[in-house]
Amino acid sequence: MTEKKTHKVTLIPGDGIGPEVTDAVVRILEATGVKFDWERFAAGAEAFEKYQEYIPRELYESIERNKLALKGPVTTPVGGGFPSINVTLRKKFELYANFRPIKNLPGLETRYPNVDLVIVRENTEGLYVGLEHEVVPGVVESLKIITAKASTRIAQFAFDFARKAKRKKIHAIHKANIMKLSDGLFLKCAREVAKGFPEITYGEHIIDNTCMQLVMNPYQYDTLLLENLYGDIVSDLCAAFVGGLGLVPGANLGTDAAIFEAVHGSAPDIAGKDIANPTALLQSAVLMLRHIDEDAAADKVQAAIEKVYGEKKTLTRDVGGTSGTRAFADAVITALEEVA
């Protein structure tokens, strides 16, 4: 019998509730029988206290070596302080595709049942990367850089995914009626890529109208292709359809590395109280399992999550339950055996 492969994964627990939800997810993943070798590192304020660096050199080296990371939430200061750890890692490892599936979990009542959307967001350029400087006191300039290379690359990713997943429709989301050159280039590249996928319906919607249309009828969309800032906003909006950021997964994918992360905040007000919901990071870990070709384990974990939610007996407070982080993880581990 062939010995099972051990997957080396860089683990970034984060801060606030990060360590709690990360520990819960690690326990569940190890219960699948898949073998992992975790390399654990601090990032952000905690790392600075220890190493005088917000992202330690050893963390960079670990990701370069493993090409795979699982990351809990890290607090990003607002209006000052250190740069976003998320943005820094995405730029460092050229993680050009942000991938966020949005799908309802059984047993959770929301305004919109049976939502099935995929957000594909360009991750390396545009306003979101924060290229800013002060021209003179009281005047700040923020640069929006859009390139044909990055726009074509993310469009190719979206269409390749849609073909593989047998999804039927892609909308490119833009503001090219005003930003005719930058957003116009993004659309030009998307149109060129779309020509190679005649089986996929291609459309274009202006960003502000898209937000309205999503709220009115999210079912008209399938896969959304967006620039960086638009994707950040729309992915959070769409998360509300299925219960919020505490439930949806996120993946940052590049040619040479991938980081799977919880997309919610670090919630320091509830840290250490055993009440945080690990579902978002757990569903991100399911994406990670698929990325490393552990599809059987991914299917089992997803089925276990859906079983626990469907039974409604061991849910955390944010989704109407009374259970804690550890109890929820225990329930998923028990369900793994039942769905095998």
Image: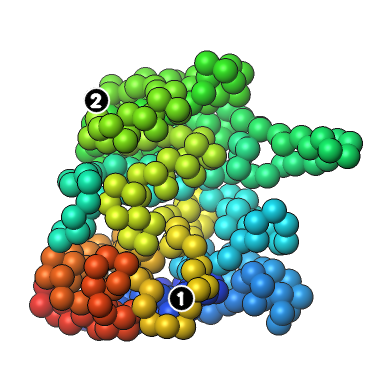
Query: Which quarter of the picture shows residue 48?
Result: bottom right
Q: Residue at 58% across / 71% down in the picture?
A: 62
Disc 2 is placed on an element classified as loop
Q: Residue at 65% across / 61% down in the picture?
A: 77
Whole-percent x, y for residue 175 in the image = 51, 23
Question: Split into 4 quadrants, where in the image is the N terminus?
Answer: bottom left
Question: What's the distance in space between the residues labelled 2 and 1, CA to CA?
Answer: 47 Å
289 in relation to 211, above or below:
below
* Number of other residues with Cα within 10 Å of mark 1, as a class: few under 14, some 14 to 19, many 20 or more: few
Q: Nearer the viewer, residue 159 or 107?
A: 107
Query: Which circle's residue, 2 or 1, is located before the other in the chain?
Result: 2
Residue kind at label 1, given as amino acid type: Ile
Q: Residue at 10% across / 77% down in the picture?
A: 338
Whole-percent x, y for residue 202 in the image = 33, 23
Q: Is residue 156 left or right of residue 293?
A: right
Question: Split into 4 quadrants, where in the image is the C terminus?
Answer: bottom left
Q: Residue at 51% across / 58% down in the picture?
A: 257
Whole-percent x, y for residue 156 in the image = 43, 34
Q: Is residue 198 left or right of residue 17?
A: left
Give the labeled residue for mark 2.
199
Q: Is residue 261 left or right of residue 123?
A: left
Give the labeled residue for mark 1.
270
Whole-percent x, y for residue 87 in the image = 60, 53
Residue kind at label 2, given as amino acid type: Glu
Disc 1 is placed on an element classified as helix
* Number of other residues with Cα within 10 Å of mark 2, as a class: few under 14, some 14 to 19, many 20 or more: few
99 in relation to 327, above or below:
above
Residue 161 image label: none
183 in relation to 251, above or below:
above
User: Are the residues flagged by discs 2 and 1 in contact, CB closer than 8 Å?
Assistant: no
